[in-house]
Amino acid sequence: MTGNSTQTEANIKKQNQISAIWILPLVALVIALWMLFQFINNKGPEITIIMPTAEGINIGKTEIKSLNVKVGMVTDITLSETYDYIKIKAQMNKNTDRMLNDTTQFWVVKPRVGSAGISGLETILSGAYIQIQPGESTTSKLNFTALELPPITPLSSKGIRVLLSHDQAGKLHIGDPVSYQGFTVGRVEKTSFDLAEKKALYQLFIFEPYDGLLLSGSQFWLTSGIDVKLNADGFNVQVDSLQSLLSGGVTFGLPAGEDVGQPFDDELVKLPLFDNYEQVKEGLYKQYVKFIMEFDESIRGLTAGAPVEYRGIRIGTVLEAPYDVAFSENNASSNKIQILVKLELGRLFDKGSNISLNTFQQAFKQHFKNGLKGKLETGNLLTGALFVDTEFDAPEPNFKMTEVGKYNVFPTKKGEFAMVQQQLSSLFNKVNDLPLNDAVESMARSMNSLDKALVSANTTIKNLNGLVSEEATQNLPADIQTSLKQLQKTLDGFSPNSVMYNDLEQTMKKFEQVMSELQPVLKQINDKPNSLIFGTDTVQDPIPAKRVN
C-alpha cells in the first residue's frame, strides 16, 4: 500500500426481514400442494379390466367413456401369467364408485361392420376407447372382464328375452334381426351350445312395446331372405326384407289355426326354433298314427317330408323313405321296400273334436276293408318327385291287418306310372314277338318287282319320244300355225325398232333427268330435315388469304 491510498471497510449489518426472492418458491410449493390435493381429491378407484387383446389400447392415451364423457384413463397394461389375456389397470375419476358394480359392462369401441350395421367410425381419427355401461346392482366390484362385442341391448332396455333351441349351430348370429311380419322388433343377443341336450341355444331380446306381440301360441322360424322350393308341391319362391336377404334372421307369429294365447310372464321364455314356416305348420299336428307301406316298385324321388294325400287333400307325411329296404335282415323274406308314414288326426278332423287316436286307428281298419290303398304318384315331372296317394279300390271284406314290428301295414297297389311302365314293357314284348324277319323278306321281294316295273316304264317313255319326233307329228294343223304368226306379229311391236319401244325409252330418259335434278334437294333434306321450314344457313363468302409458300 502507498501512503496516498485509503483503506475501506465493509459494514456488516444483521437483516431482520426475509428476502423477497423466497416468495416465488413458496408460491410454487403452495401451487404444487394444491394440485396434489386436487389430484388426490378427484382421484377415483383403480379398476382392473381383463381383455383378450390390447389392440388399440395405449397407456395414458386410451380413455374410459360413458355417454362420450371421460370417466377414467388407462394407466397400465400387463400380460397375464399364462399369456392368455391382458390385464389393464385404469384410474377412474371421482364419484365413479356408483358406476362400478357386478352388472357393469366394458367393451372397446372401434370401427366394426356387422349384421347390426356399421359402428365406431368416429374412432378412425381419435383412436379407440373403452366404453363403460353402468349396472343397476348395489354390489361393488373393481375387477371386470370386457365384452368381445358391444352389447346388442343396453341393460336399461325394457322388453322380454327368449331362448330358442335348435339341433344345429350357426343358424343365427349375434346382431341378427328378429322380425314380426317384416318389421324388426328385436335382436339376437347371445349364442351358445347346451352340451347336456346337444342343442344350440339362441338368446333373443324383443324390445318394448313389441314384447306384447309374443303370446303363448307364438312360434319362431328362420328367415333366409329368399326361400326357393321345388318339390312335389311345385315351385315356390318367397322373398323377405333386404336386411334378412343379406344377413338372415328369425321371425315369429301365430300359425294359422292356432289359438291366440296369453302373454308370457317368465323372464326368459324357452321355445323351439324351426327351419321354416312349413315345419311350424307340421309341428301343429301333434296327434298321429304311424303305418308301414310296402312297395315292389322303385321309390326313387320319394323323400322324407313328402305328402300323403287323399284326392288332393293332404292327410299325412312320409317320415322315412326307405324305412327298411328289400333283402335286409329285417325284410329278408320279401322283395318289397318299406316306408314309414304318419296320418295326422288334425288334418282330417277339427281341433275341437274329441276323437281319440285309438278310434282314429280303428276307423282306418274299416277303410282298409272298404278297399283303401296307397300308391306312388309323380308330383313333379321336372324333378321326378313322388308322393303317396290313397284311393278306394275293390272292397276286401276278409281283410286282415298285418304288422311290421310295432307298426300296422297300410295296404298298397301299383301306381299309375308303374302301371304305364308295365304296359309299355308288355307292348315292347309283343313287338319283339312279331314276325319282322318275314315282313322284311316280303318287302324285299316287293322292291325287286318295283324295280322291274320301273325298267318297263323307262322303255315305254323312250318309245313315246320316238313317236313325237316323227314328221307326221310335227305337221301341226293350219289354225295353230296362223295363231303362231299373229303372236309373232304382236311381239314385233315390242322390238327395239318399234314406236312403242322408242316412246318408252324417251320417257325413261326424262325420268332420269328429273331424278338427277332432285338429288341436291334430297341431300339437303337428309342433312337438315327442317330446312324446308326454316330454310338453310347462309353460306358466307370465302375470304381470300395470303398464300403460304
Image (tube, rainbow, N blue to C red):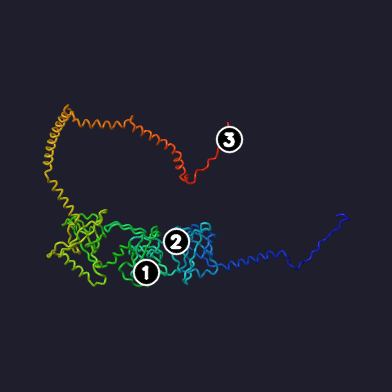
Q: Quadrant of residue 438?
A: top left
Q: Amino acid at mark 2?
A: Leu
* Mark 1 Cα-neighbour bin, 10 Å: few <14, some 14–19, many ≥20: many
Residue 528 lies, in percent from the top left, at: 47, 44
- Residue 545 has which mark? 3
Q: Position of residue 187 (x, y in %)?
A: 41, 64
Q: Amino acid at mark 3?
A: Ala
Q: Secondary structure at mark 3?
A: loop
Q: Residues within 10 Å of mark 3 (few under 14, many from 20)?
A: few
**Do the CB atoms of the residues marked 3 and 1 lie less than 8 Å apart?**
no
Q: Nearer the viewer, mark 3 or mark 1?
A: 3
Camera-nearest residue between 269 and 52: 269
Among numbered discs 3 and 1, the one appearing first in the sequence: 1
Q: Percent x, y for residue 208? A: 42, 69
**What secondary structure is found at the residue carrying circle 2?**
loop
Residue 203 in the image: above or below residue 483:
below
Residue 91 is at least partly visible in this image? no
Label 2 sits on residue: 149
Answer left or right for 420 relative to 519: left
Name the residue rendered at 13%, 43% in the picture: 436
Say whether residue 227 is left or right of residue 70: left
Marks 1 and 2: which is nearer the front?
1
**Quadrant in which the N terminus appears:** bottom right
Displayed quadrant of residue 405: bottom left
Q: Is residue 324 above or below residue 491?
A: below
First in sequence, mark 1 or 2: give its number.
2
If you read the primary sequence from the N terminus, does the residue marked by circle 3 or circle 2 appear first?
A: 2
Residue in the image at 13% along x and 48% along y: 430
Per the model, the C-alpha gap separating discs 3 and 2 is 82 Å
Q: Which residue is mark 1?
A: 214
